[in-house]
Image (cartoon, rainbow, N blue to C red):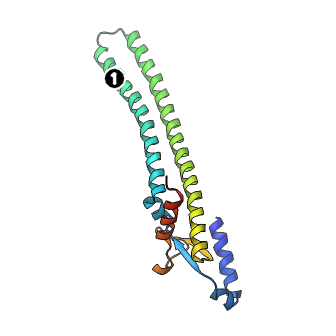
Amino acid sequence: MKKVIFYAIMMAIVPFVSSSFADGLKVGFVDAQKVFETSDEGKRVQAKVEEYVMSRQKIIDIEEKELRTMEEDLRKQASLLSPEATKMKQDEMQKKFAAYQQKARAMNKEVQEKKVESNKAFFKTLESAIKATANKEGYTFVLDKNKEGGPVLYSDDASDITDKVIDQLNIMTKK
């Protein structure tokens, strides 16, 4: 929403701006998704999130395996158990399944929150790298050149500072 308002204001102001101001205007473009996918910090964030997802998935897998074993045992023992004992085992299994589903939902929510938190931290660092690059290179504006569409439909390659931002980000986050 902020982007839409920003671009609407820019479109309204541009016709009234003097040509001398426009002569000093230097606009650059960054493909933030490419930076996220190819920078050292972006790769580090992605690996950390993936590791977190895998740790949560292992917990879910263990509980799922326990449920399957329980179900298999019930099937094997069904003919030997009394109807009351079978009903008791089925009730116990249903309770465990409900607890499993609740835990899976909670962990899924936890994973989503972790992804959002990690992305926010990354993009805050990215913003710092963009500012540093823009100041060093003399850019007045830097816009996000999104592959899925968006406000920038075309830009020449000379205005694309994505690789410079990746280099700056790698320098800033070198560990």
Q: Residue at x 63, y 88 (%)?
A: 23
Position of the N terminus, as image quadrant, is bottom right
Horizontally, residue 78 falls left or right of residue 57, namely left
Tell me: residue 32, above or below residue 161: above
Q: In this view, does 153 lie above or below 75?
A: below
Left or right side of 116 for 80? left
Give the residue at x 63% y 83%. 25
* Count of all numbered marks drawn on residues in the image: 1
At 69% from the left and 81% from the top, the residue drawn is: 12
- In the image: residue 52, left or right of residue 68: right
Q: Where is residue 2? Give x, y as percent.
A: 65, 65
| Front one among 170 and 110 | 170
Residue drawn at x 62%, y 68% as measured from the top left: 3
Q: Residues within 10 Å of mark 1 (few under 14, many from 20)?
A: few
Circle 1 sits on which residue?
69
How far across and down, in percent of the image, does residue 46 sit?
45, 51
Q: Position of residue 63 (x, y in %)?
A: 41, 28
39 shown above or below 156: above
Q: Tag 1's secondary structure? A: helix
Going by the image, does 175 lie left or right of 70?
right
Between 27 and 101, the one nearer to me in the picture: 27
The amino acid marked with disc number 1 is Thr
Q: Where is residue 131 in the image (x, y as percent from the top left)?
A: 60, 67
Rendering quarter of residue 81 = top left
